[in-house]
Image (cartoon, helix red, strand yellow):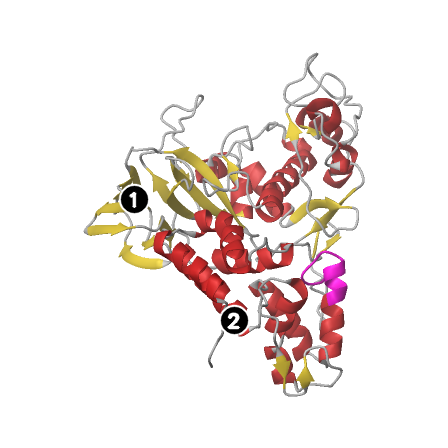
Amino acid sequence: MKLSVPLAALIVVASLLLVAPSANAASLVPRVNEAFRAVHGHNPTPAENAHWVTRVRRGDKKTFNSLVGAMAWQKARAGGSSVDTTATTKAGKVNGTSTTNKTQLIKNVLPLFVQIYGKDPANADKVWWRKRISCNEIKSETQLVNSMKFHKGKGVTKGRNTICGQKAATAAGLTQRSVSGFSDHPLGDTVRIGLQNAGSTPVKVTANGPFQVRAGSDVRAKLDAGNTITVTHSGGAYHIRGSGVEVDDDQPIRLVPVGGTIMQVTSYNDKSTSIAGKNYNRFRGTIEVRKCSDCSDVWIINEARAEHYAKGLAETLAKDPAAFEYYKALATAARSYALYHRNVTGGRQQARGYDVGRTADDQIYRGYEFEILVPRLSKAVDATRGIIVTDKGGDKALITTYFSDSDGRTRSAKEAWNTSRFPHLQHSVSDPHHASSTCRGHCVGMSAQGAFGLAKADQWDFKRILGYYYKNTRVVKAY
C-alpha cells in the first residue's frame, strides 16, 4: 500500500527522530502528547491519549522514535485518524446489525473495544466479553456494541462475573462485582511500593529459592537459592554483577521470584526498634531497580500483589484478638488506599516508578517479615480478600485515608486540607472511643483507635465501621 503523508509532517517527524533519545515506559508516557502534537499539530483527546499511553505501558512502543513513527503511520493509513478504529467483519461494518458467526464475533472484541473505549482492553476485559459470546449471551455485533456502550456509560470496562450461569462469588456476605480499572486476579492487581532511593549505593539481592534476572522483559539469567547479585546504575546504564552474571543494559532491572520464592534485599536496612537483630528486608513479589525518569534517584521497588502487600503493612495495630472486626476494617481501608492509587491516580510517584511509598506518608510497609510476625493481620486480609470501599454505586474505587487517633472527632477534608474533593471525606464525625486529648495524625477518614473501640466495645462489624467513617460509600468485593 502506498501511503501519503503531508511533507511538513514528515519533516517534523524526521527532525524529532534525529534527536529523540530512547526511553522506558515511565519516561515515555509523559511524552505521548509531545509526540502527538508533532504528528497531528494539536493535543490528543482523552481517548486518543489513553490509546497511545496504553500501547506504551504494555511495551508496544519503547522509544520516542517508535512512538512518533507509529503515530505517523496511523495517520497516513487511516486518512488522518489518530487511533485505529477501522474494523469490519464478514457480516459488514462494526456498527451493523447483522448477526456474525461466533468465531468472527470473538475476534471483533478487540477492535470494537478500542473503537468504543478509545483504548486497548486489559486481558480480563477481553476474557469477559469473549466468554459472554461463547456462552451465547451475546449473539450479534449490535448486542456487543450496545452492551459495551452501556458499560462505558457506567464507567467500567466489563460487568459482574455472574455471567453464563456462573454463581456470584461471595465474601463477608458481599457479591463480587466489576470495579472500574480492576482485574479479576484472585490476589488483586500488582502494587508497586517504593522502598528506598539507593542512589549510588549498590543494591544487593538474594532469595530463598529460584529467581530470574530480567532487563525490562528480557530474561538475562536464571539463579538458584542463595545466589546474590549486585545492581548499580551509572553512565546511563544498569550493571548487574555476581553469581556468574555480568550484564549491562539500559532497561530497569527486575529480579523475579519463581513459584513461592521470597526475595531479600540484603543492602536494604529497615531495622526493628523492638526486636533485636530484626531487619525488615524480605519481600514477596518482584524487586526492581529503576532510575527516576526526571531526577537522579535510583529506586528499589517491590512489586507485589495487593493481598501480599496488605499482609506486610505495619500500620496502627491493636493487640487484642477480640477486636477482629477492627483488623478487617483496617485491612480493607489499607487495600482500598493502595489500589485507589494504583488503578485511579496511576501512582503517587509516577516519575520514580511506584504507586505508594513504604512510610507513613502513605502506609508503613515492612513486607514478608511483618506477615510472619503479625498473623492476626494476615488472617484479616484473608477474611476480606478483594474487598474495597467504593462510591455508592459500587463502580469506582475511593481513597480511604486513616490515622491513629483523634481528640474526639474526625475532620473533613475541607477543614484539614482545604479541599472540596473526595465527597466521602467531607464529614466530621464523633469519635467516642478516642484515647487522646490531641490529634494523632491528620484526622481525616477512619480513626484507628475509634475503629478499635467500635469493634470491641460496641460490637460493630467492619462494614458498619467503614460506613461510619467514609460517608455515602459502599463496601464491595472487587475480585
How would you rate the neighbour count of disc 2 (Cα within 10 Å): few for under 14, some for 14-19, many for 20 or more?
some
As drawn, the residue found furthest toward the top would be 437
Nearest to N terminus: mark 1 or mark 2:
2
Residue 24 against residue 456 in the figure, above or below:
below
Question: In the rendered image, which quarter contains the C terminus?
Answer: bottom right
Element assignment for label 1 = loop
Cβ atoms under marks 1 and 2 closer than 8 Å: no
- Which residue lies at the image location 45% right of the left edge and 40% below the top edge? 352
Identify residue for label 2: 76
Q: Measure how far apart labels 1 and 2 are at the Cα level.
A: 35 Å
Identify residue for label 1: 236
Residue 145 against residue 414 in the figure, above or below:
below
User: In which quarter of the view is residue 450 placed?
Assistant: top right
Residue 245: percent from left, percent from top: 21, 51
Q: Residue 392 versus residue 29: which sits nearer the camera?
A: 29
Name which residue type carries label 1: Gly
Residue 238: percent from left, percent from top: 29, 46
Viewed as shown, does residue 46 lie left or right of 59?
right
Residue 235: percent from left, percent from top: 26, 42
Residue 400: percent from left, percent from top: 67, 37
Residue 245 against residue 61 in the figure, above or below:
above
Q: Which residues are magenta?
A: 149-159
State yes or no: residue 430 in magenta.
Answer: no
Residue 245 visible to an observer of this rendering: yes
Q: Residue 248 versus residue 435: which sits nearer the camera?
A: 248
